[in-house]
């Protein structure tokens, strides 16, 4: 049938050619060769010659048609094979979203991230004398994250900041279902709202006073998950236990801490965005801390300039050293609210530690709270993660300036009177610190952030003769590169 | 130390809740070779009905199709197929040999070496047989364009290749002559699809080639349904007995708790109903009475087995289709 069709086509073509040739023969040709050819007598074509020519042309057309079809089919197969290959070929990503290698189905992934925070701090004492002014590599953290079989995540994050190597995070997640995942290893305990923010997403150079109370990294195992389409999140874990604001890589064998946190975003799935990022939560830990003369297991609270404003007594003797000696609990509410270009975060925590000095013991409480606000002047949406990416990257050739955010915070830390003067020296340890900050963040792009802020920290107590520790006032700046 | 009990209680509740929810419905995945789509659509519907009537449990069988070798590779690489119904035993063997997913003696678990039906290889030509193709010999003539898939990826293509080889060896007497014959044949192949269904598309829908070397069932399907009155089947003087096998994938069914239903699914293929459905889709049934009933559908053709001519699948695979084998030597892409 295919050959018959081609024969008809060929016959049609042949007739067209013969007609055209006859017509052309009647026209005077400008070409001498054509004239000569026209002058040569041509024998009339017989019907058998025509039939043979038709058959040859049909065969030729069929051959060309097959070649064309084969080429088209080969292209089609190549496309199909390319699609199939894409399904199993791992992809390498290097771009705005970072650097990663992932399997075609996404079940396996290796992400390489990292960040550097280079600070310059110019701090003066309130009485006009010079305070600590220095350049600091606050954090230098390569981050390796892996996913295996889609269900298992791993994270490894050392820190080389300040020239000291510390293993910050090393944990594995088992993701059974969205509402039940299990994390094991070393990671942030589920407590402080600002503590749980990634260091790259902090609004200020240093976290506020409540983070002095929240546990930092600890070893343990934790169940966590999201329910009700993410409107409710929970974390519940068992840990070795750390002092306020502390991290640990080993167990001090003073009993385990249980830590839990619930967080609600009641309007998260609402169609109106007004309250979708309104979150409230409650966190608590309970456990036991016991210390020794060489390792008292009691906290020291620090200022933004990383100066110690409060510490317990310690002179190396049993009678002169306060040590942790029993129950240690923390509790407190937390909340944030982000709408449009503004956002607020607040938290309040109380920590209680049973403390002993010699044969005398008591419960010492410390409390801290903060309220902070931020406003994206350049119109970006604010969130718990800050400005994730500016609307326009800094690029003078395109008139882009990046994103700018104004920030302010007040935070306070108060240590219970029961600590003074027996367990803590009032001449060296401040009872209260009040920390006020105003600042600006400039997001050049999603990788680079510049921070500048003015901080004023005043103290009650902490100086000889019932005096107050000199205020710390200074400018803190940071260049952050995070990918 | 009493407080950590909560997460363990939650985990226990999940462990109890998940199996309870799963009892009234079950899904199976059948990883099959290329041309069986229509067959298993009908088998699946019939089995689901029979299984629900027998047990009260609803079963949904999902299908995955591709070249037989590719399908075996996918299962080894993690495709969670409860059963495989592949084009040749060598590909199922790979699940045992490479994937350790099934026992080595898998072929003994069901009747007829776990092949519920058979088929053979025939030649499909265009209506009127314009190139006068009568037998394998005609496929090596100059000017004949032959369509067959790639034996590296397609089980059907391996059957095609071995059928041609077996013919040549019988006719010309030596393996060297057979190799020369098959090399000439593949010089007439303008395009290699990855699977049998792709080759059918090339021949039937894209209008390429003068002859399609095909599974008998695929050729019959083409003449009856894909292009009625456009094609003819040429039954060669001799062909190969193709035995597409089936197996439960033990590691998968044990993990998913589907062994019982998966086993019943494969046994259903041997039942009178399953054999009838196979025959309607032009697969040669094993049951003599069903075969007799559909005898008119299946032309008589002398057939040799792979064991007789090639010493079994393992040897045939190593000699002809492994990297560096005979096929790699005789086939030049784009020639």
Image (tube, rainbow, N blue to C red):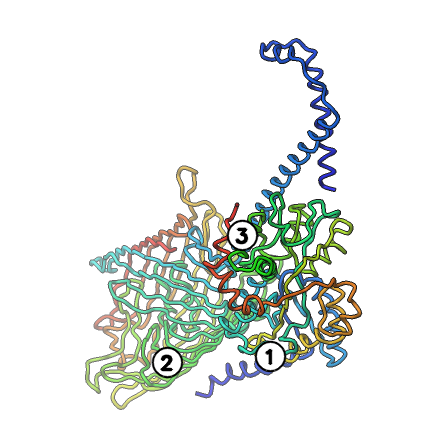
**Where residue B9 sits in the image (x, y, percent)?**
53, 84
Q: On what subunit does the disc labeled 3 rest?
A: B
Secondary-structure class at tag 3: helix
The answer to which quarter of the image holds residue A136 is bottom left
Q: Position of residue B306 (x, y in %)?
A: 58, 67
**Which image quadrant: the N terminus of chain B?**
bottom left
Residue at the bottom extreme, as displayed: A359
Q: CA distance from mark 2 to mark 1?
A: 56 Å
Precedes in sequence: disc 1 or disc 3: 1
- Residue A240's disc number: 2
Q: Residue at x 73, y 68 (%)?
A: B278
Say left or right for A134 vs A202.
Answer: left
Residue A355, quarter of picture: bottom left
Q: Residues within 10 Å of mark 1 (few under 14, many from 20)?
A: few
Count of numbered labels shown in the rendering = 3
Q: Nearer the viewer, residue A262 or B126?
A: B126
Q: Chain of mark 1?
A: B
Residue at 71% x, 62% y is B38
Residue that numbered label 3 is attached to: B183
Q: Is residue A315 above or below residue A48?
A: below
Tag 2 subunit: A
Residue A265 in view (yes/no): no
Decide which of A7, A475 is in the foreground and name it.
A7
Q: Residue A29 bears which disc, if any?
A: none
Real-space Cα separation, disc 2 to disc 3, in angstroms: 72 Å
Q: Is residue B82 left or right of residue A215?
A: right
Q: Residue at x 41, y 43 (%)?
A: A401
* Residue on which disc 1 sits: B108
Q: Residues within 10 Å of mark 2 (few under 14, many from 20)?
A: many
């Amino acid at each position: 049938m295919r050959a018959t069709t081609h024969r008809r086509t060929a016959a049609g073509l042949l007739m067209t050619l013969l007609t055209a040739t006859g017509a052309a023969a009647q026209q005077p040709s400008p070409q001498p060769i054509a004239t000569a050819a026209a002058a040569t007598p041509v024998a009339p074509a017989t019907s058998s010659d025509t039939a043979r020519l038709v058959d040859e042309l049909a065969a030729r057309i069929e051959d060309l048609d097959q070649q064309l079809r084969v080429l088209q089919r080969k292209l089609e197969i190549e496309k199909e094979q390319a699609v199939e290959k894409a399904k199993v070929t791992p992809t390498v990503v290097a771009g705005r979203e970072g650097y990663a290698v992932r399997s075609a189905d996404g079940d396996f992934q290796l992400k390489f991230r990292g960040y550097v925070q280079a600070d310059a701090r110019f701090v003066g004492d309130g009485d006009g004398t010079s305070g600590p002014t220095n350049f600091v590599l606050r954090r230098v953290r390569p981050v390796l994250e892996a996913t295996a079989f889609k269900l298992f995540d791993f994270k490894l994050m050392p820190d080389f900041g300040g020239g000291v190597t510390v293993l910050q995070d090393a944990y594995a997640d088992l993701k059974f279902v969205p509402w039940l995942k299990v994390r094991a290893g070393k990671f942030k305990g589920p407590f402080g709202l600002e503590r749980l923010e990634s260091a790259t997403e902090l609004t200020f150079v240093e976290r506020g006073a409540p983070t002095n109370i929240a546990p930092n990294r600890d070893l343990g195992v934790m169940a966590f998950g999201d329910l009700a389409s993410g409107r409710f999140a929970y974390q519940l874990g068992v840990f070795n236990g750390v002092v306020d604001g502390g991290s640990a890589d080993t167990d001090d064998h003073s009993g385990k801490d249980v830590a839990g946190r619930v967080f609600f975003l009641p309007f998260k799935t609402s169609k109106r965005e007004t309250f979708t990022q309104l979150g409230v939560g409650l966190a608590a830990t309970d456990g036991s801390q016991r210390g020794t003369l060489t390792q008292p297991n009691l906290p020291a609270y620090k200022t933004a300039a990383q100066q110690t404003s409060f510490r317990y007594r310690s002179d190396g003797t049993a009678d002169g050293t306060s040590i942790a000696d029993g129950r240690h609990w923390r509790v407190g509410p937390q909340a944030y609210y982000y709408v449009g270009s503004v956002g607020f975060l607040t938290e309040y925590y109380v920590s209680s530690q049973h403390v002993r000095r010699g044969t005398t013991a008591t419960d010492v409480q410390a409390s801290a709270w903060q309220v902070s606000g931020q406003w994206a002047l350049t119109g970006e949406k604010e969130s718990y993660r800050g400005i994730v990416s500016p609307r326009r990257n800094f690029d003078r050739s395109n008139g882009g300036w990046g994103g700018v955010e104004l920030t302010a915070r007040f935070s306070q830390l108060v240590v219970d009177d029961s600590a003074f003067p027996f367990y803590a020296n009032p001449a060296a340890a401040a009872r209260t610190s009040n920390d006020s900050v105003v600042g600006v963040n400039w997001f050049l792009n999603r990788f680079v952030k510049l921070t500048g802020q003015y901080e004023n920290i005043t103290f009650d107590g902490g100086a000889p003769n019932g005096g107050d520790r000199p205020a710390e006032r200074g400018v803190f700046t940071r260049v952050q590169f995070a990918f | 130390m009493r407080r950590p009990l909560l997460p363990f209680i939650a985990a226990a509740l999940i462990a109890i809740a998940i199996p309870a929810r799963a009892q009234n419905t079950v899904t199976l995945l059948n990883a099959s070779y290329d041309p069986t789509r229509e067959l298993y659509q009908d088998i699946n519907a019939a089995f689901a009905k029979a299984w629900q009537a027998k047990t009260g449990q609803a079963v949904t069988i999902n299908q995955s199709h591709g070249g037989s070798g590719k399908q075996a590779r996918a299962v080894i690489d993690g495709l969670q197929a409860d059963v495989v119904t592949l084009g040749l035993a060598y590909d199922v063997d790979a699940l045992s040999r490479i994937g350790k997913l099934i026992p080595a003696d898998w072929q003994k678990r069901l009747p007829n070496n776990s092949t519920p039906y058979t088929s053979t290889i025939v030649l499909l030509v265009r209506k009127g047989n314009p190139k006068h193709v009568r037998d394998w010999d005609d496929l090596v003539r100059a000017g004949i364009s032959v369509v067959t898939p790639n034996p590296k990826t397609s089980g059907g293509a391996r059957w095609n290749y071995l059928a041609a080889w077996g013919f040549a060896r019988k006719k010309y007497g030596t393996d060297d002559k057979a190799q020369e014959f098959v090399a000439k044949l593949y010089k007439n192949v303008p395009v290699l699809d990855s699977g049998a269904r792709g080759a059918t598309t090339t021949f039937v829908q894209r209008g390429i080639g003068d002859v399609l070397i095909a599974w008998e069932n695929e050729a019959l399907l083409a003449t009856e349904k894909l292009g009625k009155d456009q094609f003819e089947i040429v039954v060669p003087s001799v062909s190969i007995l193709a035995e597409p096998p089936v197996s439960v994938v033990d590691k998968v069914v044990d993990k998913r708790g589907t062994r019982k239903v998966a086993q019943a699914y494969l046994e259903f293929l041997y039942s009178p109903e399953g054999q009838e459905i196979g025959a309607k889709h032009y697969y040669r049934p094993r049951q003599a009475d069903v075969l007799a009933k559909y005898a008119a559908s299946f032309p008589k053709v002398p057939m040799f087995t792979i064991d007789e001519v090639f010493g079994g699948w393992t040897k045939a695979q190593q000699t002809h289709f492994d990297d560096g084998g005979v096929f790699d030597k005789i086939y030049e892409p784009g020639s």
